Amino acid sequence: MARGECNCRAVQFEIDADLSDVYVCHCSICRRATGSNGIAVVLVPNERLRWITGLEHVATWKKPDGDWEMRFCRICGSPVPGENDPKTMFVPAGSIVSGAESLRVSHHVWVGSKAAWDEIGDSGRQHVEGFRAGPS
Ligand SMILES: [Zn+2]
Ligand SMILES: [Zn+2]
């Protein structure tokens, strides 16, 4: 079980699963969305994520020419869980406030287009382009 929240705590959620893998996307879209070297996320099946409060404060921005989207708290701007694919949610790893102890970076994606100053120093597998976790 893990719990997450945005900076202003208007949006809170819990995850009913043992978390292990963090995926870091280094693409330019994720970099602009976070202002950092990309975004670190945990993937969870839809039915494992429960909104505790604040779903009405969640805003979505969809990239007009693609299937990329970002959800964030419209009060404080923190990234919040969004749709990864129809069956899976992505949860920003930094939004998890308890239950994150067992998390480790397992995959880096879009390493081929990472920022020049972005130096990867952990043992996660590096993928030049995108990588989707298997259906299981
Ligand atoms: Zn907030
Ligand atoms: Zn990305």
Image (cartoon, helix red, strand yellow):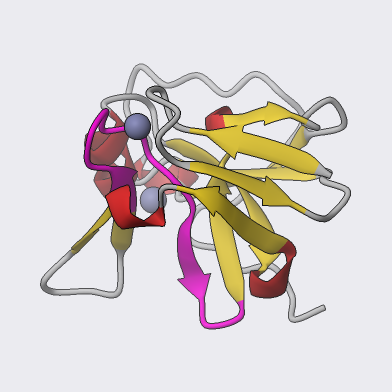
For the record, the magenta segment spans: 71-87
Can residue 76 be found in the magenta stretch?
Answer: yes
Is residue 72 on the magenta stretch? yes
| Residue placed most toward the observer, 54 or 30 | 54
Q: Residue at x 64, y 59 (%)?
A: 50
Going by the image, does 63 lie left or right of 7? left
81 above or below 28? below
Identity of the residue drawn at 82% across and 78% down: 136
Residue at horizontal 37 percent and vertical 24 percent from the top = 8
Which corner quadrant of the figure contains ligand 1?
top left
Residue sitting nearer the eye, 124 or 78: 78
Check the image and name the residue furthest to the front: 53
- Residue 108 is left or right of residue 57, and the answer is right
Judged left or right of residue 51, residue 80 is: left
Q: Looking at the image, which residue is at 32% across and 29% down? A: 115
The number of numbered discs placed on residues in the rendered structure image is 0
**In the rendering, at what x and y percent does residue 51 appear?**
56, 55
